[in-house]
Image: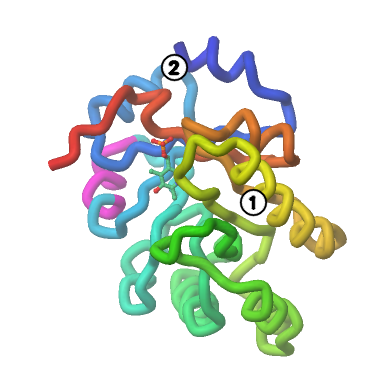
Amino acid sequence: MLKDFKATLPPHVTLVAVSKTHPVEAIKRLYDEGQRIFGENKVQELISKQPLLPKDIQWHLIGHLQTNKVKYIAPFVSMIHSVDSLKLLREINKQALKANRVIDCLLQVHIAMEETKFGLSETELDEILSSEETRAFQNVRLLGLMGMATNTENETLIRNEFKKLKSLFDLQRSRFSVLSMGMSSDYKIAIEEGSTMIRIGSLLFGGRSFT
Ligand SMILES: *Cc1c(COP(=O)(O)O)cnc(C)c1O
């Protein structure tokens, strides 16, 4: 199943298996099929699952992160997709230093129409990227951008939102290598528009139970 899905992906696209709400047994099953990168959207859920699973899993935090919770994941998290302020980046750098690590980070950009989705505006993105402070951080590695398209059937809208994110990514092509865009419902469009990392939950794990 995992193998069949991965066979459909171009080689430059990295698969993050989004395991939120799924039990460690389900994660272990995908692990046994060879998957090593898993994504969670809540710190509490991530830190409760991580100790129960193999140590060579690369954990990605893909959901909104509060500054005061960075310290709980800094010792082990592999990548944080949801950096949406300089303040948060500063705290990740500080906690990574404490843990004697370098943490890969993506800046989350708001590309969707929906008000509720987190992320930076273009202006805020520019501010972080041009800040002297950002360049001086030793314990975070800013690898690229993440974005979520509007939850809609309108493929043109989704495609245009991904195009927008890709254009922002291309402006920083000399420093960026990761463009995280695409979920179960829209990953094909995302890949067509230049995604290098897709975050897939329901397609791999089956429907979530919303408790
Ligand atoms: C849940 C989630 C996904 C995966 O969603 P699916 O529709 O289950 O593939 C991707 N990205 C983020 C930020 C998520 O919270």
Q: Which residue is mark 2?
A: 33
Task: Please give the range of residues in magenta.
Answer: 46-53
Observer-nearest of 90 and 183: 183
Residue at the outermost bottom position: 132
Q: Is residue 105 visible?
A: no
Amino acid type indicated by mark 1:
Glu
Amino acid type indicated by mark 2:
Glu
Return the disc, 1 or 2, that comes first in the chain's sequence.
Answer: 2
Determine whether 167 is above or below 49 in the image: below
State the predominant SS element of the stretch in magenta. Answer: helix
Q: Is residue 5 visible?
A: yes
- Check if residue 74 falls in the magenta segment: no
Label 2: few (<14), some or many (≥20) within 10 Å? Answer: few
Observer-nearest of 56 and 164: 164
Which numbered circle lies on residue 161? 1
Kindly state the secondary structure of the residue where label 1 is placed: helix
User: Which percent across, then down, holds residue 17?
Assistant: 45, 34
Q: Is residue 132 left or right of residue 53?
A: right
Determine whether 91 is above or below 211 in the image: below
User: Which percent across, then down, holds residue 191?
Assistant: 68, 34
Viewer-side label of 1, 2:
1
Residue shown at 48% from the left, 32% from the top: 185
Question: How much space separates mark 1 and mark 2, taking CA atoms?
Answer: 33 Å
Observer-nearest of 64 and 30: 64
Label 1: few (<14), some or many (≥20) within 10 Å? Answer: many
Quadrant assignment for the N terminus = top left
Residue at the outermost right position: 174
Asked which colour scheme the image uses, the reply is: rainbow
Quadrant assignment for the C terminus = top left
Residue shown at 68% from the left, 41% from the top: 195
Residue shown at 63% from the left, 16% from the top: 8
